[in-house]
Image: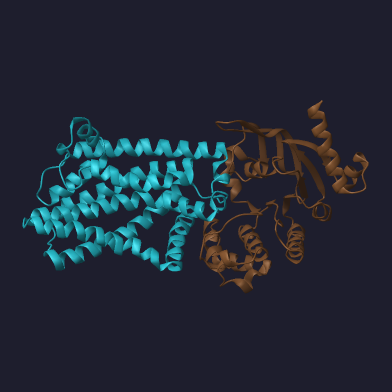
Amino acid sequence: MDDIKISGLSKIFHSKKSNITALKNISLSINKGEIFGLLGPNGAGKTTLISILAGVTTPDNGTVTMLGKNVQTHYKEIQQEINIVRGFSGVLQNISTRELLKYYAKLYSVEEKGAIDAMRKTGIWEKRDCIVSDLSSGWRQRFFLAKALLNNPKILLLDEPTAGLDVHAARTMRLLLKQLNNEHCTLLLTTHNMQEAEELCDRIAVIHKGEIVAVGTSKQLKTSSKSTTLEGVFLNLTKEAEDERST
Amino acid sequence: MSALHRIHACVYRSVIMLKADMFRMMDITVWPLVAFLSTALFAAFVTTNKDVLTMIILSTVGWRIVYNFQIEPAHIIMEDTWSGSLEQLFVTPIRTWELLVGGWIIAFIKTIIVALLFVGVSTVLFSFSMPNMNILVLGLLASIIAGMAFSLITLGIAILKGPNSYGFLYALIDAITVVSGVYYPTTVFPWPLHAIAQLLPTTHAFNLLKQAAHIGEASFLYLILTSMLWLIIGTLFCSWAVTRARSTGRLVRMK
């Protein structure tokens, strides 16, 4: 069964100066228990797609079904069952890890024990009394992962979760994500790191200028693109899309 | 039950933020007291009329009530925007009404602290004695409802317009309070402004507080009608603003 089903999704952001087409007729299905990677250059529409799935942005056209419910009409119910980790998110200032997680736990109607479990699982327990805004990027990402695990999500949306992390911190994050997936959590991950996508993802979609230009396993993408690396696939696909547009 | 948890979360958040930065206590204690004392001492200097002094004390409490109730829900949005964590709030299952109720509870707690402070200081410095209690309670309740109605609009603007509007939102309620004739009758204004004042629930709430101090008389009919009108306008506007912000992607991009 599909945990996420997207069909004909479009989004245009209107401003006084110009209209930006963020997503153009996107259709995708993500299976239960899958790690699905979304690759694309900056401004390709990855963040917009994640925001729509997270229920904080509404699409112009198309439908999104998550866990069998329509995101447009049931987004508050869905938000209770999913969660999100962003690569570059801020945190409330001067609050300790434990207190801030306790606050978010209350927002998900989870008891303090749930916050403690999430802290232990992600290893941030040892920083429980530290101020979150003072933590290093790696620890802060662990905080966000702990926050995202508070409600035992069935689906986890990850927007560049290892962006800005050093090699060790990124490695730890990937191990945590794998562990989470082994516990049957479906992961939708955006990244600029090809190695990470290859290592983690069961299937990958390449998005460029709001359109999905390819979907498949890493192996399938390499075969169809006649490339030996995922980076080659990515460069070919985004270049092809660019060339098609210019002709 | 879940709604109660989320409302509690808003209150808990305010408590931990206050604990994290004790200077915030000054917003509840020192600054309101400075404003109160400057007005009350001036009044005591120019008049010995006890009713006038009582009216000024009650009106200052009313002003504080309206201010706290109007700004607190929007304050939650402002703090998250300043921290770059607004999206983290909106990806949770919290509903707009829960956020509002959470903000109002914080406002209520702050108001109790400020009111006790004002009454305590007034009793010592100005020999303040409690006026007509029934009317006073109604006046305070009317001030709370007026603050709630304006908070719906304030929250809507904060979500819709983001940080650029925050300065305006802090000033908005003070401007409304002045037009509502906080320490004086609205008849002092020229006709158009006087007419506008009659459409504001704060005008009639302040009139009730003045009546509690035996100065003037309030219209209950106008109070009920204007309160209902602004609650309806506020609810519609706030609801539209949230829908609009989700449509424009504002909740993700607001920093």
- Could you tell whether A245 is left or right of B18 in the image? right
Q: Residue A149 or A94: which is nearer the viewer? A: A94
Q: Residue A174 or B36: which is nearer the viewer? A: B36
Q: Quadrant of residue A234?
A: top right
Visible residue check, residue B11: yes
Q: Where B3 falls versus A4 (above or below)?
A: below
Look at the image and tell me in which quarter the C terminus of chain A lies. Answer: top right
- Tell me which residue sits at (81%, 45%) in the image: A204
- Could you tell whether B194 is left or right of B67 in the image? left
Give the total of numbered labels: 0
The single residue placed furthest to the left in the displayed view is: B48
- Tell me which residue sits at (28%, 42%) in the image: B176
- Could you tell whether A97 is left or right of A245 in the image? left
Q: Position of residue A56 (x, y in %)?
A: 58, 44
Q: Quadrant of residue B21?
A: bottom left
Visible residue check, residue A1: no
Q: Position of residue A244 (x, y in %)?
A: 82, 29
- Tell me which residue sits at (47%, 41%) in the image: B161
Q: Which chain identifier belongs to the brown chain?
A: A
- Tell me which residue sits at (23%, 40%) in the image: B223
Q: Residue A106 or B51: which is nearer the viewer? A: B51
Q: Position of residue A70 (x, y in %)?
A: 63, 38
Look at the image and tell me in which quarter the N terminus of chain A lies. Answer: top right
* Display colour scheme: by chain
Q: Residue B54 or B6: which is nearer the viewer? A: B54
Q: Which chain identifier belongs to the cyan chain?
A: B
- Could you tell whether B225 is left or right of B134 in the image? right
Q: Position of residue A153 (x, y in %)?
A: 65, 54
